[in-house]
Amino acid sequence: MKHQLLLVLIFLGATLNALNVIGQNPILIIPKPRMAEQSRGVFTLNPKTSLFAPDGLLKKAKQLKGYFEPALGYDLSISSKRANKDLIEFKLDNTLKRLGEEGYQLKITPEKVSLTAFTEKGIFWGIQTIRQLLPNQINRSATVKGVAWEIPCVSIEDNPRFKWRGLMLDCSRTFIPKEQVKKYLEAMSYFKMNVLHMHLTDDQGWRLEIKKYPELTSICSKFHESFREPKENEGFYSQDDIRELVEFAAQRNIEIVPEIEMPGHTTEVFAAFPQLSCTGDTLKIHPWTKGAGVHNEVFCAGNEKTFEFLENVLKEVAELFPSAYIHIGGDEAPKMYWKACPKCQARIKDNGLKDENELQSWFVKRIEKYVNSKGKKLIGWDEIMDGGLSSSATVMYWRAWDKSVVQKIPLIENDIVMTPTSHCYFDYTYEKISTERVYSYEPIPAGMSGDKTQKILGVQANFWSHLDRTAPRMDQQLFPRIIALAEVAWTDPGKRDWIDFKSRLEPKLTYLDITGINYFGKK
Ligand SMILES: [Zn+2]
């Protein structure tokens, strides 16, 4: 009898709880927060709404104004006095250190929106949550009439599961214009992603201005004329462009990690600097579909000029990008020319190396020393483990099909970013990697537990631009899969549910429509 009474009480409680929020907009945030409790009522933005923030957060208050004022059609004032109602308030609070530097607390009542965090970063993610709680129309760039700008009352406490929530854009195979990169940065921040890895160099073109070597852009950023490639597929970012992108990203909590490929995927360099390869041949830069996907020509590891060149390049890269990391590629470097090259063989002999794999390892370690001397950490594709790797380098794991690599993952001591071809390769079709498949991904590998899991920094989608080369095609390869990955990277696995995610994704597609982003399945 007692038991039955308890059940009735539980049922009543659940019903009352549901009634609390009946008729109100549900909480539809992506990524799903750690904790969200909705309560009755709404806060409504109106011309009397004012912002109150300490000096250190005025920039963030202005950012919120920038997001909302175009659609509202009126100004939200920043007030030096804390109003009793119609108030949006930002606060920093040291006791929220327990949520980490990206965590935040958001309390919304009919009178005020109160956003508190340990750092400015947390405040920024809280602002994204507020954006997502408002009607999608708030993202329009012109005044929208007739919408009630209501935010459901809710109490949220939130922080990310992983600190690396990334997207790699291959800007080499096809040049991706600055404005398109900004569009992706903006959408990434809306879904709380925080790393943009720019693959700036590869066989199809060098895309970064280096003052010391103007030929890298005057020659190496262009396809050979014999291929009659459309002009828009080539080009480069000037150093001013990069500074602009870095600043644009930083305002949105996003770090841009630059990648300069070596020792392979570097034949574009040999279009102007043939003396840096083992063969000395001048190569023609071709679109990916019109030549080898992986070339045998790589940087000569026995030639001191190679290191002089790379260090001069990396010096400028380190100065341009404030990121803690420099990515040096390291993937798919065939060893046939190293085997035949007297200089490379002399290097192997002089350093007591066993073979060409150890030569690659020697190469990477030498470059790592230089990268470290510039105050940066080295990261590379998982091939940098071949032949031995220093424990301070970070590995970007991609070879999901190779059992010998997969088995190594739980054993290695290095920090790792998970980007396996099985779930994270967004140049693959949706038939191969569906949004649901991305959503099902668990970045902590089987066999890893306890403190070891701390080695997994996070997860990243990789988009290679060899086949999908126009903006609408690229958009479609990225969206909506990237939104699923954003939740994988942020939300605890126990909170993830595909059906629930789909119900939240549907309204977010309207955000993509409004911001001009194409996506797979768009009607
Ligand atoms: Zn060589």
Image (spheres, helix red, strand yellow):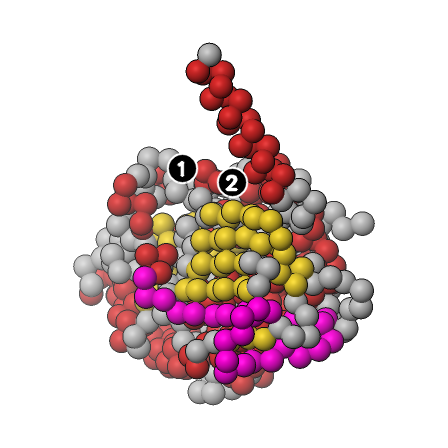
Check the image and report above or below for 335 versus 441: below
User: Mark 2 or mark 1, which is nearer to you?
Assistant: 2
- Point out residue 226 in the picture as x, y percentages from the top left corner: 70, 72
Dividing the picture into quadrants, the one containing residue 119 is bottom left
Q: Amino acid at mark 2?
A: Arg
Q: Amino acid at mark 1?
A: Lys
Dividing the picture into quadrants, the one containing residue 439 is top right
Q: Residue at x 70, y 45 (%)?
A: 23
Q: Read off the residue under disc 1.
A: 403
How dense is the environment of label 2, judged by Cα within 10 Å: few (below 14), some, or many (20 and up)?
Answer: some
Q: Read off the residue under disc 2.
A: 496
Q: In this rendering, does residue 368 appear at all?
A: yes
Check the image and report above or below for 465 versus 49: above
SS at mark 2 in the image = loop
284 with respect to 91 (left or right):
right
Q: Residue at x 51, y 48 (%)?
A: 36
| Chain part drawn in magenta | 68-95
Q: Residue at x 69, y 63 (%)?
A: 149
Q: CA distance from mark 2 to mark 1?
A: 28 Å
- Point out residue 268 in the picture as x, y percentages from the top left corner: 53, 71
